[in-house]
Amino acid sequence: MHATSIHSRHPRLELAARVGAGVLGGYAFAWGLIAASTALLCRAGMDFHDAEFLGSALGLLAWLVVLLGAVSGRRNPAWAWLGLLGGGALLAALGSFVQSTIA
């Protein structure tokens, strides 16, 4: 027997889950991207404030792309939550590790 998707049973719930994943999960992903890119750019020799500005600009663009992707995706919204929160956590860990190696 074929399992019914959340889309066919509760379309408003699915939309709320997608918007939540895009906004909150996208924020976590963008925050991790900003942390990782700022640390990596500083490690590469860029001035901190320039690296922070460039990382923030990249994070804002990434958040917009992630938001649009999560809302318009065809997969289960749980995958968006998992991917965005997991990706954000990994990027934040990478940023923390790189930052600990900077003297």
Image (cartoon, rainbow, N blue to C red):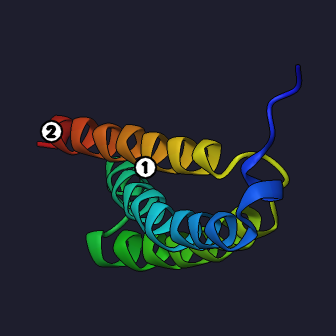
Q: Position of residue 77 (x, y in %)?
A: 65, 52
Circle 1: element type: helix
How many circles with numbers are drawn on the protein? 2
Viewer-closest of 4 and 66: 4
Instruction: Report whether 66 appears left or right of 50.
Output: right
For the point 71% across and 46% down, the residue is 76
Residue 13, picture quadrant? bottom right
Can you name the residue that lies furthest to the left here? 103
Instruction: Report whether 80 appears left or right of 94.
Output: right
Instruction: Report whether 19 appears left or right of 54.
Output: right
For the point 88% across and 19% down, the residue is 1
Q: Position of residue 102 (x, y in %)?
A: 18, 42
Residue at which label 2 appears: 100
Mark 2, other Cα within 10 Å: few <14 / some 14–19 / many ≥20: few
For the point 53% across and 50% down, the residue is 81
Can you name the residue that lies furthest to the top here? 1
Give the mark nearest the N terminus, 1 or 2.
1
Instruction: Report whether 58 appears left or right of 90.
Output: right
Q: Position of residue 74 (x, y in %)?
A: 85, 53
Q: Which mark is residue 88?
A: 1
Q: Position of residue 71 (x, y in %)?
A: 73, 69
Three-letter amino acid code at the position of disc 1: Gly
Mark 1, other Cα within 10 Å: few <14 / some 14–19 / many ≥20: many
Three-letter amino acid code at the position of disc 2: Ser
In 3D space, how far apart are the residues under numbered discs 1 and 2 (Cα atoms)?
18 Å
Q: 31 above or below 1?
A: below
Q: 61 above or below 96?
A: below
Circle 2: element type: helix
Viewer-closest of 50 and 30: 30
Query: Is label 1 or label 2 in front?
Result: 1
